[in-house]
Structure formats: C-alpha cells, structure tokens
C-alpha cells in the first residue's frame, strides 16, 4: 500500500523546500520530491553559483585593476579558473546539503526522482527503473523554470550556452556574445568581462533591463560600457553556424545585418515554466499560452487539492517571491490568513555596481498621478568615499499629495543589501518622510537613502 501524505511538494527549490518545511511545522505529514540536487535551479545552477562567480570575478578585477590605488602593492596577478569553479561548486554542495539537513530536521520525507501527477491525490515518483506511487491529500507544484531556447540558437552546451554551462566554463573565452540584456545576461556578461573576455550584449529592445526604471538602467548601462562591455540594441540574433571552431552569429538591426565570430554565445532571453511530464494538463489544470499554470488567490489550480507557486505560475520570477508564496500557500491550506504583497517585492541585479529596486518605476508611478522624486549620489556619501565606491545614486519616488513611498531604486555598491530597508518601509505603507526621519548610522551607505528621501521633500542636507 502506498504511503499517504497530507502534502506532497514537487520540486525542492526555494519555493518547494520552504513550503515543505512550513507544512511540516504546521503539523502536516509532508514529502518533497526532487529529481536533481536539493535546492533546485536557484541553489545549484542559478542564484547561488552565479553570485559566487560574480564575487570571485569582482575580487580578481579589484586586485588586478584597483587595489594599487589604495596603497596595496601586488605582484603579477594570475587567474586559476578551475580553482574559481571549484570554489563555486563547493558553495553549491554545502548549500544543497544544508537543504537536506533542514528537511530532515523538520521531518520532511525526501523522495528522489521525477514527480508526475497521476490524478488528484496521487503522485508517481520515478527514479531510474524504480517507480512508486504516493497518495496525498494535497499536492503543491513548485517545479520552477528553465532557460528559454531560441530555435535559431539551440543549446549545444559547448559553444551555444545557457546560463547553466556559462557558470561552468574552465577557460575564459576571448570573445563572447550574450543574447539578451536582462539581469541574467548582464550579470554573466559581467563575470566574463571582468575575467578578460571581450563581451558584447545583443538586445532586441532599446536598452538593458527592460522592466527597470529607465534612468537607473541607462545609468548602469553606461557604467558597464566603461568596464568594457559592448551593447547592440534593437538587434536580434538570427542564427549561428560553426566556422573553423568558432561560432559565427548573424544579427539584424532594422535593415542592417551582420555577423560576429566569437568563441561562445550565451543565450539568456528569459525563462519558461517547467511542466515537462508533470501531468498538469492531463489531470485538468488550466495552463496559459506561455505554459504557466493558472492559480487563484489561494494558489489553487482548477483541480481541487492541487496548488502551484513560484516561477511555474509566472509573475515576478524570483526566488524570494517563490518563498513568500510558499509560506502563504501552506498557511492557507492550514486555514490561516495569509497573503503576498507583490508591490513590496525587491529585485536586484548583481552587477558591480548593483542595481536594486522595490515598488514602482518613475514611468509607472507617473502614469498614476503626481509624484515627487529625491536623489542622492553616492559621491556625496562619506562611507562610499572612504571605500572608493562612489558610482551610482539613490532615487526615491513618492506620491506628491500623500507622501506615500511608491518606489526606491538604488544603483551602487551593496544596493542589494540596502534595498531591504525600503522594502520594509513599503510593506508597512510608509511615507518618504518616515524614512527621512529614521536614524541611519554614520558613516554608512544607507545614509544616501535618507538623503534622497530628504531631497524628495526639499530638505536635503548634503546634496
């Protein structure tokens, strides 16, 4: 007789493992199904390894090009690419083991294999030649997303790469084209540019990071250009062929066409929901034109007893969004009140400097009514000066009538950490003046946020 669970979670990424742990803490007999390594895409081939590589490449760049200015003399600097990849892999291994520990600590049963929903209340787990069917009162889908593949640029894992292969290269390519100027493209483009590759980003739209505040994205673009990254906008990749061991990429910009011969092509044009062989459509779940599973405000699919969260349902495709949905979904399953405030969900682009945002862009806010804007450059911040990180600025957007905080955008070193304060303020429906009147330790980078808020109300002290 098959084991019966109160909840079976399919997928162990940030949404899946958090949901499983929360369910167990609320008293559910819970299982978590994972066909690959625990932690999902984010931990194994996404967020965590990319940040390790971003950190290592920035350190290399700092030692080679900047520390001399700070009175630190070094000899010849060399790159140990296998050593860097080994560090990244070790980080991933330890994080994945940590997820396993947390599941075990919370009495969650880990089921290794591919999960497929046979019917409401029934999940088949296939691991090699072994197949087991488990019964569940509820099923939660948290299968995440995968890189979108362009028909004209099919991944071969060697020359035409997805983000997965781009994080595992053992040699620095002399020339690389990145197709797609979203956050993954500019982050990984930054990694290889810092390590010595000649990087060109080909983007179909008029600028990088299309959903971002235009002023902020354009400012970051200029900084990346100073770092050596080249951009081709309003340009589409048409196809590729191998010529003398290199990739010849053809492109089109309006009526103009051309080719580029490069060592590697990284395709990062977005991500698709992973529903392959899941059984979603077969059991009656509603799926939209892009492949996302449709859910209601309680994360319930059209099929009773089956829920879905994270990238597989679309919306903001970020790990921390999946985590919040995980907690809310399970709490509602248990009869508790819960919700997710998407308006207070921050996003970070981990280039150097970083670009972090929460709330509305200037373009979005302006369409809703009268707004006020305050800015503070990091060049006016004592801490930024003392650590030689003066690039960038803080931009605060408030409602002109109510002073309600509508959006915060930070371009600078440590922006990803600084944005948390703004996210909390927005979660509590704070005003611009609330942040302006809050203590900020001196000298610290977040003082620039305080100054930007003061500037929005025309009370700035240092700018």
Image: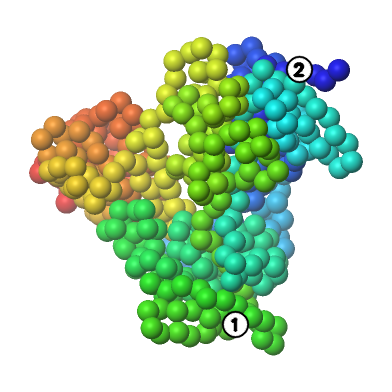
Q: CA distance from mark 1 to mark 2?
A: 54 Å
Q: Where the N terminus falls, by quadrant?
A: top right
Name the one closer to the observer, 444 or 350.
350
Where residue 149 appears, as percent x and y from the top left, is 59, 61
Q: Which residue is mark 1?
A: 248
Q: Is residue 67 above or below residue 20?
A: below
Disc sitting over residue 206 in the figure? none
Residue at the (53%, 26%) spot, across then down = 300
Residue at the (25%, 29%) spot, across then down = 430
Residue at the (64%, 51%) spot, across then down = 45
Where residue 368 appears, as percent x and y from the top left, is 19, 42
Mark 1 against mark 2, which lies toward the viewer?
A: 2
Name the one closer to the observer, 35 or 92.
35
Where residue 26 appears, as percent x and y from the top left, is 60, 14
Disc sitting over residue 4 in the figure? 2
Residue 456 placement, left or right of 440: left
Q: Secondary structure at mark 2?
A: strand
Residue at the (59%, 67%) spot, across then down = 151
N-term-proximal mark, 1 vs 2:
2
């Amino acid at each position: 007789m098959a084991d019966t669970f109160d909840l079976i979670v399919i997928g162990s990424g940030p949404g899946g493992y958090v949901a499983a742990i929360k369910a167990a803490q609320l008293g559910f007999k819970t299982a978590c199904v994972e066909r690959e390594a625990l932690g999902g895409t984010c931990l194994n081939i996404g967020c965590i390894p990319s940040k390790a590589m971003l950190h290592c490449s920035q350190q290399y760049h700092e030692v080679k090009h900047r520390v001399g200015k700070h009175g630190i003399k070094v000899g010849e600097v060399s790159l140990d690419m296998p050593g860097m990849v080994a560090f990244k892999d070790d980080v991933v291994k330890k994080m994945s083991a940590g997820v396993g520990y947390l599941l075990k600590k919370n009495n969650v049963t880990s089921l290794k294999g591919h999960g497929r929903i046979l019917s409401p209340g029934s999940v088949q787990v296939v691991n090699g030649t072994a197949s087991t069917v488990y019964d569940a009162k509820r099923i939660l889908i948290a299968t995440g997303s995968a890189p979108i593949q362009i028909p004209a640029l099919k991944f071969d894992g060697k020359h035409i790469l997805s983000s997965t292969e781009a994080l595992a290269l053992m040699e620095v390519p002399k020339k690389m084209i990145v197709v797609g100027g979203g956050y993954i493209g500019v982050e990984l483009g930054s990694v290889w540019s810092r390590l010595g590759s000649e990087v060109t980003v080909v983007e179909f739209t008029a600028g990088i990071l299309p959903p971002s505040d235009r002023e902020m994205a354009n400012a970051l673009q200029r900084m990346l250009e100073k770092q050596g990254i080249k951009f081709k906008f309003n340009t589409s990749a048409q196809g590729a062929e191998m010529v003398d061991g290199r990739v010849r990429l053809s492109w089109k910009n309006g009526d103009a066409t051309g080719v580029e011969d490069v060592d590697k092509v990284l395709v990062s044009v977005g991500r698709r929901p992973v529903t392959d062989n899941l059984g979603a459509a077969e059991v009656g779940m509603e799926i939209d034109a892009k492949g996302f599973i449709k859910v209601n405000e309680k994360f319930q699919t059209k099929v009773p007893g089956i829920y879905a969260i994270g990238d597989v349902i679309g919306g903001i495709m970020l790990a921390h969004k999946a985590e919040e949905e995980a907690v809310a979904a399970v709490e509602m399953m248990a009869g508790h009140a819960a919700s997710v405030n998407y308006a207070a969900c921050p996003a970070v682009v981990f280039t150097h400097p970083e670009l972090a945002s929460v709330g509305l862009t200037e373009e979005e806010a302006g369409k809703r009514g009268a707004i006020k804007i305050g800015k503070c450059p990091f060049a006016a911040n004592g801490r930024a000066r003392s650590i030689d990180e003066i690039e960038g600025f803080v931009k605060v957007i408030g409602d002109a009538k109510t002073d309600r905080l509508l959006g915060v955008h930070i371009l600078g070193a440590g922006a990803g950490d600084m944005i948390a304060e703004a996210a909390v303020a927005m979660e509590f429906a704070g005003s611009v003046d609330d942040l302006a009147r809050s203590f900020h330790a001196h000298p610290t980078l977040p003082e620039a946020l305080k100054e930007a808020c003061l500037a929005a109300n025309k009370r700035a002290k240092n700018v």
